[in-house]
Amino acid sequence: MEIQMKMPDLATTGSDVRLVRWLVSPGQIVKRGQPLVEIETEKAVSSVESIATGLLKEVRVLPGGMVSAGQAIAVFEVATTLPAAADRISESAASSLGAVPMVLPHYKRAFLLSLYERMVLIREFEERVRFLFLEGTMAGTIHQCQGQEATAVGVCSALRANDWITSTFRGHGHALAKGLSPQELLDELFGATTGCCKGRGGSMHVGNMDQGMVPGIAIVAGGIPLAAGMALAFKMQNSSQVVACFFGDGAVAEGAFHEGINMAALWKLPVIFVCENNLYGASTHISKVMKNTRISDRAAVYGFRGQTVDGNDVVAVFEATRHAAADCRAGNGPVLLELLTYRRIGHSRRDPCHYQPAAEREAWLSRDPLLRFATCLEQQAAISAAELAEIKARVDHRIDEAVQNAKKAPLPAVEALYEGVFG
């Protein structure tokens, strides 16, 4: 069967891009996800991955040629339909984990497996979305969280059902960890009325108030004062609820961060400030914007507790969040959790990620949260590789169904354009 690969929309201005060179020659076998071609946009030279595993039969644009989004650039000969993106998890060797060993407290097997399944769900959801974009099936922009699964799952698993979270433009993982379904998220990304925000929010604003998740706020640090306000409401209502507020290391440089945590400290509000420190604010390394790069130290200045945690260890994140939530419910005020992690992909869909040094990237990828946890489950919880493979297959099937349904989901009518708009 022949499959055409079209150029995804990688130019920030919608302009054509220049094809620099092919990394694979016609007649060679290519794997899905393998860098296929280099292109040059107005921002940088980057590579585009193959959407299929098979024989590269034909290239349709020569080096130096200009390419428009949606234009066919290559033809593949494949024996079957596109393989699931989930296969990418098992491609990495577990021999180079090289991190501080994870230690499992005496949790029930069912709980440990539920943590693993949610992490796999996030990784595979993000990988599928990435290829839907590369295939030209999904429009819009994406900011993804591959590599940060343990932060979302660890935090949300420690919350009660009636606790709330605020999120960012990189919110797919937070949403899935908080209980939103892959179906409502994919429907949202396809712009359907059945999406979690009725197709109006898109990738950067996912959420569901019925699940305790405020739709993502794309303004950097914008969720911090909102979370403090929500926590103030809970305190005034004598509620035991807490708010977990996700933000990145780049948000620490914003005034809203300092104003929000200061208010929460003064009034001893039940809010957990969760900084997902992946070392980069967009493309700028944390060391270039702050002298003291230990973000949890900021809490002491405002008079409350801060803690730095291995954000690639889902159990460590769960334990830290559980204790932080207990502090909040006891009336001790906010807690700042700095979760050290690393994103495996660029800041956004158009980011080639060239700013991550090779040695740094290799070291962090060797500490992949999924591989570490899987190894720990096999070695310390007597959970077999077959059980983990069954989870992966179940997740694959669930996402397959959700993608097919999302492609057929109803789009909003033109007449609905002004619904929900305040004028």
Image (spheres, grey):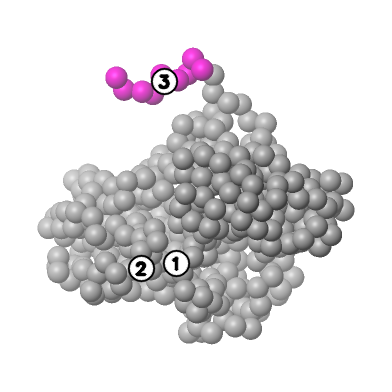
Earlier-in-chain disc, 1 versus 3? 1
- Please state if 299 lies on the left or on the right of 206 as rendered: left
On the rendered image, what quadrant is the C terminus found in?
A: top left
Q: Is residue 246 above or below residue 214?
A: below
Q: CA distance from mark 1 to mark 3?
A: 42 Å
- Please state if 189 lies on the left or on the right of 296 as rendered: right
- Please state if 398 lies on the left or on the right of 284 as rendered: right
Please give the residue where the numbered disc 1 appears in the rendered image.
355
Please give the residue where the numbered disc 3 appears in the rendered image.
419
Q: CA distance from mark 3 to mark 2?
A: 41 Å
The kind of residue tagged 1 is: Tyr
Residue 250 at what x, y percent from top left? 31, 60
Instruction: Mark 1 and mark 3 in contact? Answer it, CB < 8 Å.
Output: no
Q: CA distance from mark 2 to mark 1?
A: 9 Å
Residue 183 at what x, y percent from top left? 60, 41
In this view of the protein, can residue 272 be seen by the observer? no
Please give the residue where the numbered disc 2 appears in the rendered image.
285
Provide the secondary structure element on which disc 1 rests. Answer: loop
In this view, which residue lies farthest toward the left?
266
Instruction: Mark 2 and mark 1 in contact? Answer it, CB < 8 Å.
Output: yes
